[in-house]
Image: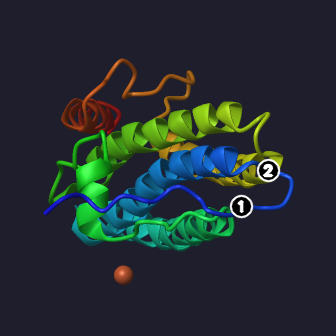
Amino acid sequence: MAPKKSAAAKFTVPGMSTSDGTEVATLLQDRLNALTDLHLTLKHIHWNVVGPHFIAVHEMLDPQVDAVRAMADDTAERMATLGVAPMGTPGALVQARTWDDYDIGRAGAIEHLGALDLVYAGVIESHRKAIDATEETDPVTQDMLIAQSGQLELFHWFVRAHLESSGGELSTAGATQETVAAQKAGGAAKRTK
Ligand SMILES: [Fe+2]
């Protein structure tokens, strides 16, 4: 079956051209995919975390799930406001995304947080690019993305605080793959015990 695609906007918010409305909404579809992927991944970790820090990490993640779900909702509704249908189905997400699925199952809390460090870094980096890209076309969308980024960066710090040494170094430094980040974080946690 052909991928479902959002059609170009036939109307958009007053004061914007329909081509700008379509362009901004297209960019928001990618942010929607990233946020939906992130809140599902956070729940996956909430369910699969094991070991000594289980309850702290298990309980830390639910408020993040709720906040990221709300961000996805706002993002989809901004697309609709701009005159473009948001695609919210799992199949459309998997078909459109440019990143791999989270690849860690049941694992220790620090291992998951090591991998989650990279997940958050990817989403936040792309959000910042979207902030730059909406500077001229749509400050209202940009404002929403800035507010989301502030919250995402705070959650990222919650994760990173578990991976940081007293010297201010991250155990995941240099890792570009989730499995490697998880191994590095887990190894550092064992050495400091
Ligand atoms: Fe739960």
Note whether residue 50 is visible. no
In the foreground, 143 or 68? 143
In the foreground, 50 or 65? 65
**Looking at the image, which residue is at 50% across and 22% down?**
169
Quadrant location of the N terminus in the rendered image:
bottom left
Identify the amino acid type marked 1: Thr
Q: Are marks 2 and 1 in contact (CB under 8 Å)?
A: yes
Quadrant location of the C terminus in the rendered image:
top left
Residue extending farthest to the right is: 15
Which of the 4 quarters of the picture holds residue 47? Answer: bottom left
* Residue corresponding to mark 1: 12
Where disc 1 sits, the SS reads: loop
Residue 85: image location, x then y, percent: 50, 68
**Looking at the image, which residue is at 62% across and 71% down?**
77
Query: What's the distance in space between the residues labelled 2 and 1, CA to CA?
Result: 7 Å
Number of marks: 2
Using residue 135 as the reference point, say whether residue 172 is left or right of it. Answer: left
* Residue corresponding to mark 2: 16
**Label 1 neighbourhood size at 10 Å, few (<14), some (14-19), many (20+)?**
many
Residue 163: image location, x then y, percent: 44, 37
Which of the 4 quarters of the picture holds residue 182? Answer: top left
Task: Tell me the quadrant of ligand 1.
Answer: bottom left
Note whether residue 95 is visible. yes
Where disc 2 sits, the SS reads: loop
**Label 2 neighbourhood size at 10 Å, few (<14), some (14-19), many (20+)?**
few
Residue 78: image location, x then y, percent: 66, 64
**Looking at the image, which residue is at 68% across and 64% down?**
11
In the foreground, 54 or 68? 68
Identify the amino acid type marked 2: Met
